[in-house]
Image (cartoon, rainbow, N blue to C red):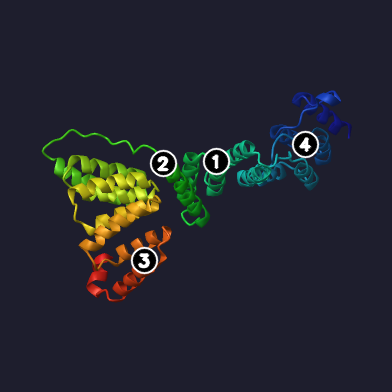
Amino acid sequence: MKSCLFVLMVLLLALGLAAAPQSSKKPLTKDQVMELVKGSVNSAEVANLVREHGIDFDPTEDYFQALRNAGAEQALIDALNAARPVKPPVQDPTAQAKQHIKGANSLLGTGDIDGAIALYQKAIQENPGDGEGHRLLGIAFGKKKDWQRDVSEQRLAVLLNPDDAAAKAELTLALQNVAAEQVHTDPPRPAVVVKPPNDDSAEQARKDFAQGQTEVAQRKFEAAAISFSEAAQLKPDWPDPLVERAKVYMKLYLFQEAIHSYDKAIQLKPNDPVTLDLRGYAYYSASKFQQAINDFDQAIRLDPSRAEAFQNRGNAKWQLGDKIGANADFEQAKALESGTSAQRKSKRR
């Protein structure tokens, strides 16, 4: 017994664990525990030391097996398990973001718009991929009549969650408010890499156009807009890149930019009912309903069998309160659709 105590004291002194004041006791390391076991110290004694000092490591099953191989008994294993350092709780950014949103909603209800905005922004910092924070932040900016920032946040909300009907409705409302105040809200067009003209410019334009189509398929819309812009610059008489770029802008809810791109395409191809119909829909999306109707009128004059143009014109008329005219267009669109030949349907697809 005395021999065991002597061995224990020698090991404690060697490991710096003996005669330590109560206030300065340090937790045992994994190497110190192993040395005690290998030094033939009784497992019960080592367990007491573990309970007294604590440990600064999280023992693994491999470590426990190594201790058993060195002669440790179950009492020491149990003590080590009980002495595991308490890990601080892991913060859930999603839960934290929801907490911020809940607080922001309360502040917004009391009229503290600036306080709500600050909390919504914190929620977005915690969970930037959640469209709800952007949608609610946009609503808060709308209450300050800051329509530009309202539109920006609603666009982000829709891009993050394309199925969010609430965000789409808020975006439409924000764009209508912008139109009412005649404030241009769209960000600048994506930067275009200027390429010097050369003999192969037409071929390069086709390559850029194909690259843009690939990027659209990959939903890389900003990159696609740049590729189509480069193709249009290299081959200025080619309307297709301008039309495709406009379609990309529509996917990004950049309605003014889409209209601008359609304008250039129509200058090159003024009697194309498809492009006129597409520009009309861009005007409609930007809440410019009369300008949309003007384009749909032209598209219908050029192609009276175009059911889409009648349907779109009916929607625009409905927005302006012309429900009789709208219903007439809806009926005409329905009649054209039901009478559409299989060949025309195949072409439209």
**Marks 3 and 2 in Cβ contact (< 8 Å):** no
Q: Between disc 1 and disc 4, whose residue precedes?
A: 4
Q: Is residue 84 left or right of residue 319?
A: right
The residues bearing labels 4 and 3 have C-alpha atoms spaced at a distance of 98 Å
How packed mark 2 is, by other alpha carbons closer than 10 Å (few <14, some 14-19, many 20 or more), is: few
Return the mark for residue 141.
1
Q: Quadrant of residue 181?
A: top left
Which of the two discs, 4 and 3, sits closer to the camera? 3
The residues bearing labels 4 and 2 have C-alpha atoms spaced at a distance of 86 Å
How packed mark 1 is, by other alpha carbons closer than 10 Å (few <14, some 14-19, many 20 or more), is: many
- Mark 3 secondary-structure assignment: helix
Image position, residue 75 (x, y; %): 81, 45
- Residue identifier under label 3: 325
- Mark 4 secondary-structure assignment: loop
Three-letter amino acid code at the position of disc 2: Gln
The residues bearing labels 3 and 2 have C-alpha atoms spaced at a distance of 27 Å
Q: Between disc 4 and disc 3, whose residue precedes?
A: 4
Three-letter amino acid code at the position of disc 1: Phe
Image position, residue 158 (x, y; %): 47, 50
